[in-house]
Image: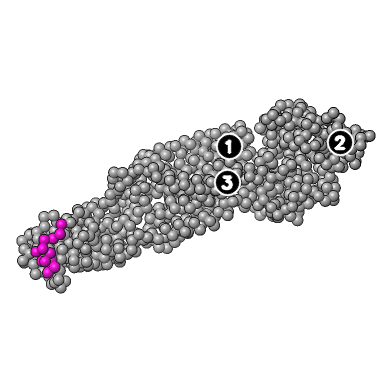
Amino acid sequence: MNVEITGLTRRFGRTQAVAGVTLETGPGVFGLLGPNGAGKTSLLRMMATVIAPSSGTLRLLGRDPGSYGPRREIRRRLGYLPQNLGYYPGFTVAEFVEYFALLKEMPAARVAAAVAAAVERAELGGKARAKLRTLSGGMLRRAGIAQAIVNEPELLLLDEPTAGLAQLAQRVRFRALLRELGQRATVVVSTHLVEDVGAACTQVALMDQGRIVFHGTPGGLAACGAGYGTGDAPLERGYSAVLAAARS
Amino acid sequence: MTAVPVAGRPVRARRWPLGAAGRLLRLELRRNAMVWMVPVAAALFWFTAYRKSVASPPLWDLRAMTMQGPALLVFVSPVAGAAAWMGSREGRRRITGLVAGTARPRWTRQLATWAATTCWAVVACLGCVAVLYGVTARQAAWGGPLWWPAAVAAASLPALSAFGFAAGTLVPRRFTAPVIAVAAFFALGISTQPIHGSQSYWQISPVVTGPWDIGPSAGVATFYHYLPDLPIAQVMFLAGLTVAVLGALGLPAGSGGQWLRRSAAALTAAGLLAAGTAVTLAGTGRMDAHGMITIPALHDAAADRPIRYHPVCGHAAIPVCLHPAYAGYLPGVAAALEPVLSQVAGLPGAPARISQAAATYHQGPDNSVSTGMAGPRWSGTPAVFHLVLPGQLPGPTMTTSELAAQVRADAGPPIVAAVIGGGPGASPAQQAVMAALMTAAGVPPSAAPAPGAPQPAAVPLPAPVSAAAQRFAALPPAARHSWLVRHLAALRAGRITLAQLP
């Protein structure tokens, strides 16, 4: 298992963002669904080793990120796209991706090729030398994806990756990319768009108020919505039904 | 997005393989805020430091020491501001969360950014110094560049950059950079205010080039070696500060592993120790007789020996010889002394040569400094008259004609007095001849004494003496000279009366 989480909690002052999450997942695309404020981003940030859990145990890629050495090793094999992507506007796309390749301690000899490949995969080959300040929101999102995958991570954490990808064709190709990445890595995708989960994910978890209220396959989630009236698609009806049940 | 892996076409071809650290530094160099500050700093350097230095006489010591302080004050704001801007970059750009999840320790990431900022600053500063030194090399008649002032200026920039960067890291706000730029300027500017006399811990301030009460002076480090005692302490202090501040950046949790943080702690301690030691050393320094700061623990006694040189001489009525560094001023000095020397040339007791001597400095009470001359006024047989040129040579505060007038006024009275036997107990005839020769040479009666010479009496001459002087001065030069040849012995012995004067 690449991700092993037991009883994980995270508090911000009086707010309990994550309340006792237990989760295990291996290679494949794992969808993390939930409404705003459900705790998805906090869970992802803990998995990205950006913030430490308040309690519980977390093992990533077979290592405990609580200690510096293993945490550094995890980070070398990790890709992370945060919900709000910060960037240096003066950097070009290629420089931005190269910067993160270097911060991820990729061997210097591999950096140039890896940057080129990541930029191409993010469909930014023609914009490789464009400054980030000149890019649209969707292109910036793709630059963020490029930096996340530049080190060919074994654990890829994407927080709302399709936000800003307005064109349907782009989203379809992104889902294909997710499926391809999921063949050899664990890809955790946090999203509020259930169609992304249905199209790309092999497993799905639904969070609400810091807890996981559903964990299974997209088909299983869709089945939960049988007979439930809210939502256009089966998966959406399942999502609404599970949430309603959790809150009742 | 494409699901098909693409064959790796490098976005940018690499001619030379660079290590990861080298690539990171290159990225930071390319996208560094200091790049935009370089033209600003260069323009400010030209406007203040360069123009001020080039306006001073082309003496290496003077140019170098005039440059150090203004150059620093020019660079402090751009460097500290740019470093603060770069230090606050992650916070301002809200990228902290993203970079925090990467393997490279925060400390090494910060050091790369700081190093790039500092590299640009140092290159810009050294470039400016190189231009100034290049111009000086074409103008200076003697000597070579002083590297220590340039080294102190260059060593200041990493420290300023480290302070700015640390401030930006601690307070990652948009206004941090301008606030730090202004604060650093004033901090450096007022760092010399507490200096009292030549013995002060505050001499460690990198804008101090020597004894604060002298400032950059033409008389320093020409006849004697430039003493690097204070610059060594300053570089030690600046290097210590730089290391301490950069080490402190690695102390917070999250900066790196335990080993890294221990190294950072050790560096901080070592840096503080070095800086503290340097301040202590600077406090033990005092001004020596040659106008430089000596620090006993750093002093090399061999540097106290005068520099050997071959003087350059101009042939007036009596040869006038100057230090080769002042070769450009020889015609002016010789012309200034010619009217005096022509009055006494060939007379018994007249000097065989006028030779420039080194100035000496003595720290007085409070912040006063008195200047004098190294060695006696007269020496050797035949006699050589030693001359100290005014401390300020022609430049922003003195014209060539002012220099000539001052040299004539300084050297004229003692030379004439030595020939005719003038002095405090001079006879009326001697006083009259002295006044007549000074008038003929164009020396005003209230001329200032030369450094080290006794203060002449400000009492006006009695009427009979004044009348005799006017009479004697009105004679044709040849008649005056021939009378002196015939009667000088009697005049010196006090046997000539006013009535006997022609």
Q: Per the image, is B464 magenta?
A: yes
Q: Tell me the quarter of the picture where residue B472 sits.
A: bottom left
Q: Is residue B139 left or right of residue B424?
A: right
Q: Residue at x 17, y 65 (%)?
A: B437
Q: Residues within 10 Å of mark 1 (few under 14, many from 20)?
A: many
Q: Chain of mark 2?
A: A
Given residues A208 and A155, the one toward you in this image is: A208
Which amino acid type is shown beneath numbered disc 1? Answer: Gly
Q: Residue at x 21, y 63 (%)?
A: B444
Task: Give the Cα distance between marks 2 and 1.
Answer: 46 Å
Q: Chain of mark 1?
A: B
Kindly identify which numbered label has been placed on residue B447: none
Q: Return the residue at label 3.
A: B175
Q: Is residue B300 left or right of residue B152?
A: left
Q: Which residues are magenta?
A: B459-472
Secondary structure category for the residue under label 1: loop
Kindly identify which numbered label has been placed on residue B250: 1
* Co-location on one chain, circles 3 and 2: no
Task: Give the Cα distance between marks 3 and 2.
Answer: 46 Å
Q: Nearer the viewer, mark 2 or mark 1?
A: 2
x, y percentage for residue A174? 82, 46
- Residue with the most extreme right position: A227
Which amino acid type is shown beneath numbered disc 3? Answer: Phe
